[in-house]
Image (cartoon, grey):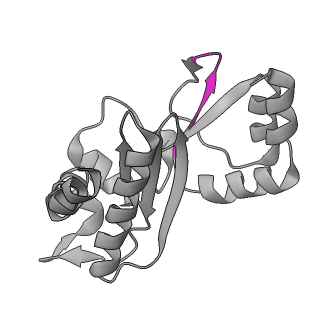
Amino acid sequence: MRTSKLVKYYSQKGFRDFMLRFSKGREVVPQFRGRFGSRPQTYRFDSELLNSIRRGASSFHFSEERWTNPMTLSTEMKDKELNNLRAGWDLVFDVDSRVLDYTKICTKLVIDALDFHGIEEVSVKYSGGSGFHVGVRFDNPTSIKSVPVKNLFPKAPRIIGLYVQEMIKDYLKEMLL
C-alpha cells in the first residue's frame, strides 16, 4: 500500500483512539519500510502515534504481554524481573496455512474449541496473507494452583495451544479430506 494511503488510514481519529486504548500497558513496535522500530516502545499520547504515522509506519506490532511499565523492558532482564514487570498476557492463536480457505476452517475450529470450554469473548483479526489471529483476553483467572497467571508466560500459552491443536485435530482432518 502506498505511504500516502497508509498515512491517511492511520491518521483517522477513530483508528488512533483505538490504538491508544489498545496500547495501554503493551509494548508496541512500528514497522518502517520492512524494518522494525526501536524497542522498547509504546504509545501513550496521540502525538507519539502521529509521529510514527508521519514517519511512514506501515504496521504496528503489539505484545501479547501487558506490562506495568513497558518502557522499562530490556532484553537483558531475567525471568524474575520480567514476572515482576508483567501485569498479564493475552492468549493469541496464530492460525496460518498456505490456503486461506483451510485457515478459515481451522480458525472456526479453534473458536469452537474455546467456546466448548466456556470462553465466549474471542477476537479474530486477519493477520495478512492467509492467516488469522484468534485472541482471548487473559484477565481471569488470576492464579492457578496459587501461581499468578501472569507468571505462567510463555509456558501456559504453549500448553493451551497444544491442547487446542490436539482437540481439533480429528475434526480438521475430517473437514479437509
**Figure quadrant of residue 169:** bottom left
**Percent of width and height locating residue 152:** 21, 59
- Residue at coordinates 51% horizontally, 43% vertically from top-left? 27
Quadrant containing the N terminus is top right
- Residue at coordinates 31% horizontally, 47% vertically from top-left? 82
- Specify whether residue 137 is painted magenta: no
Vertical comparison of 80 with 32: above or below: below
Q: Is residue 147 left or right of residue 40?
A: left
Find the magenta span and give its range: 27-34
Work out whether residue 70 can be spotted: yes
Residue situated in front as seen by the camera: 80 or 53: 53
Vertical comparison of 129 with 115: above or below: above
Work out whether residue 90 can be spotted: no
Q: Is residue 47 left or right of residue 135?
A: right
- Residue at coordinates 28% horizontally, 46% vertically from top-left? 81
**Figure quadrant of residue 90:** bottom left
**Percent of width and height locating residue 30:** 61, 31
